[in-house]
Amino acid sequence: MAKTVALIVEDEIVIAEGLKCTLEAMGCEVLGPAPNCSAAIEVLWSRRPDVVFVDTQLGTENCEVVVEECDYQNIPVVITTGLRLVDLPVVCQDRDYISKPYRDAELEATLRLHKVAPSARVGQHLDA
């Protein structure tokens, strides 16, 4: 079975590296982390990941352009955030999301979901 290819879009290096290590330990090929929108778009144009984990705030940028590019390419997006659902930017609402700090069970559920049926539970918080 081919590895799931995941792109991480996260500006906080400690969080990004922690997520990268966890996803790699779960058998994923990880692209990035991309620390900003332009870096993420470059990756999206050069490689097509199976799923993209996108932080809602990337320094002074929000993630809207990245989410829209993923939609254009029909790539599943999982919003990663410390915000409550009601506080998410509009472009992030009605999408899968996981809360920071991440739990391994949430990440495993997310990967299983997007390997089998990427749009099966859009807009739901992913718990184990």
Image (cartoon, helix red, strand yellow):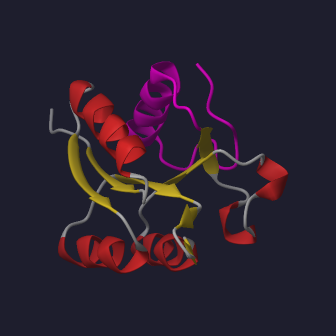
Residue placed farthest to the left in the image?
A: 2
Task: Determine the residue located farthest toward the right in the rendered image.
Answer: 86
What x and y, as percent, mark residue 116?
41, 37
What residue is shown at x 52% (from left), y 31% (from top)? 102
Is 126 inside the magenta-drawn segment?
A: yes
Residue 85 on image: x %, y %? 78, 49
Magenta stretch: includes residue 117: yes
Residue at image point 25% right, 42% down: 4
Q: Is residue 107 above or below residue 16?
A: above
> Taking 52 as reference, is 33 left or right?
left
Magenta residues span: 100-128
- Residue 107 on image: x %, y %: 45, 30
From the top left corner, tell me how far across and down residue 52 is, in percent.
40, 55
Q: Nearer the viewer, residue 41 or 101?
A: 101
Q: Residue at x 44, y 77 (%)?
A: 69
> Closer to the camera, 82 or 127?
82
In the displayed structure image, the side of residue 113 where residue 128 appears, left or right: right
Quarter of the figure that contains the N terminus? top left
Q: Residue at x 65, y 44 (%)?
A: 82
Up the image or down, 124 lies above or below 38; here it is above
Locate the C terminus and report the quarter of the image it occupies. top right
The mark total stands at 0
**Position of 127 compared to 73: left or right?**
right
